[in-house]
Image (spheres, rainbow, N blue to C red):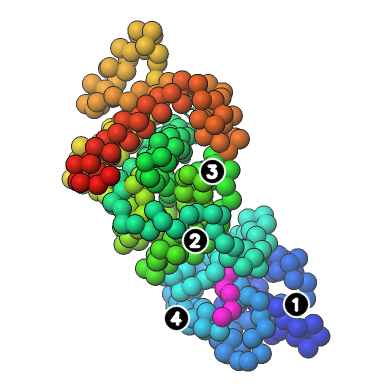
Amino acid sequence: MGLLKTEQEVGIAACVIARDVQAFDLLIEDMEAELGPRWGGLDFQDGIAYLSSPEARDLEFVTVAVDRTDEENLEPVIELIRTAVAANIKVILVASDLSPMALHQLLRLGAADFAPYPLPEGALHEAIERIRTPSAAPAAVSTGGGANENREGVILPIYGLAGGVGATTFAVNLAWELAQLGDTEGFRTCILDLDLQMGSVSTYLDLPRREAIFELLSDIPNMDRDAFTSALQSFNDRLDVLTAPAESLPYEILTSDDVNPLLDMARSMYDFVIVDVPKTLIQWSETLINRADVYFALIEMDMRSAQNALRFIRTLKAEDLPIEKVKYVLNHAPRFTDLSGRSRVKRLAENLDIDLEILLPDGGKAVTDSCDQGLPLAETAAKNPLRKEMAKLAKSIFDLSVEQVAAKGGV
Ligand SMILES: Nc1ncnc2c1ncn2[C@@H]1O[C@H](COP(=O)(O)OP(=O)(O)O)[C@@H](O)[C@H]1O
Ligand SMILES: [Mg+2]
């Protein structure tokens, strides 16, 4: 690729900078589609020189493409991104098969956006759109008054022990019930979707995934209240939501050193911090259990859940994690009238040697419909049996918190 091939004719709006630009042919195609001839390709050395020069001032952004081979020597990439950031030029990082460590390191330098390579359909377009839309004002998260007081919220992670057991449905509905209960008493609730790859809180609450989320998660060490708040969005004025980022990020983008301050920030501003936990066990899974007040683990009445639960319990014991914080929730539990079902529940609890106190009924198609509509059950099917149980559970958590605050001399 010629160096800034058409600079003289049209003015260059963007560059692709890579060790070997030709190796990223899908990116080249996408850049052509987005910018026509108004972009050029450079290697790292030329890129650093160009970005340091006054001609680069008018660049809208640079796309920095890296792959595994670059990991052997990340220095030029790091210098390049630093140069771009210093020159106020936005960086879209495109990474092919990079180790989480390297990705983490590069994102930290201040890339404005990220896309995996091969590029998913539309990913570059969306990244460019996000860069072009100046960080919109947060969708009315109230930062005034209550949110700035120093609170000491409870942390309630929700973990599904198998795919599709209903963890996110539980998290979203618990959060909404708590948000409503707390509203009159001045209690505040937020939900953090830390399922960075599969996160569906945004779908279940019909909220967009904002660019500021990526900015927040990739630079937690520099997070302040403003950065945190501007990544949140409000659902119906009562529940503040950190959705998963727009592009699915590797879980390792966060470390325990990030998750701790993130939770600290959330609980200093909210009384109830609901966390949707990734299914995969990762480095910071431990952090979430250690920091939890109650750690909800959802299962179903099937072999998959039972076996995963056994493994989970074994891990907790082996790692000496606070097993007593885990409250098991059986979703799609048999009805009271289903006696054989009930005795199966009892057997399951005995076999796993756990208490199964929280039994949630199947709410039928209304539950999936409400997820699809992007509304909590309270708003679409208030009389649904699942909703009734969620409301009861939220009430008991809420009452406990009120008692605790009262005991500490608050409220
Ligand atoms: N108690 C329930 N009754 C009926 N449908 C449910 C119930 N719990 C969850 N679902 C449905 O199951 C599907 C998967 O739920 P989800 O919360 O996304 O699971 P997970 O987050 O554990 O992967 C969704 O369509 C949801 O509406
Ligand atoms: Mg989920």
Q: In the image, which is nearer the foreground, mark 1 or mark 2?
A: 2
Q: Which badge, 4 or 3, is on the more N-terminal residue?
A: 4
Q: Is residue 369 above or below residue 2?
A: above
Residue at image position (39%, 9%) is 338
Q: In the image, which is nearer the foreground, mark 4 or mark 3?
A: 3
Q: Which badge, 1 or 3, is on the more N-terminal residue?
A: 1
The one of 169 and 179 positioned closer to us in this rendering:
179
In the image, what residue type sits under mark 1? Arg
Q: Which badge, 1 or 2, is on the more N-terminal residue?
A: 1
Residue bearing the label numbered 1: 38
Distance from disc 3 to disc 2, alpha carbons, whole Å, reads 17 Å
Badge 2: residue crowd in 10 Å (few <14, some 14–19, many ≥20): many
Dots 1, 3 in contact, CB < 8 A:
no
Distance from disc 4 to disc 3, alpha carbons, whole Å, reads 46 Å
Which residue sits furthest right? 9
The one of 37 and 288 positioned closer to us in this rendering:
288
Question: Residue 408 in the image: x percent, y percent?
Answer: 19, 46
Question: Can you tell which quarter of the image residue 178 is in?
Answer: top left
In the image, what residue type sits under mark 2? Ser
Please provide the residue range marked out in magenta: 88-94
Is residue 146 inside the magenta stretch?
A: no
Q: Is 8 positioned to the left or the right of 324 in the image?
A: right
Residue bearing the label numbered 3: 236
Q: Which badge, 3 or 2, is on the more N-terminal residue?
A: 2
Question: Residue 186 in the image: x percent, y percent?
Answer: 38, 45
Residue bearing the label numbered 2: 230
The one of 89 and 398 positioned closer to us in this rendering:
398
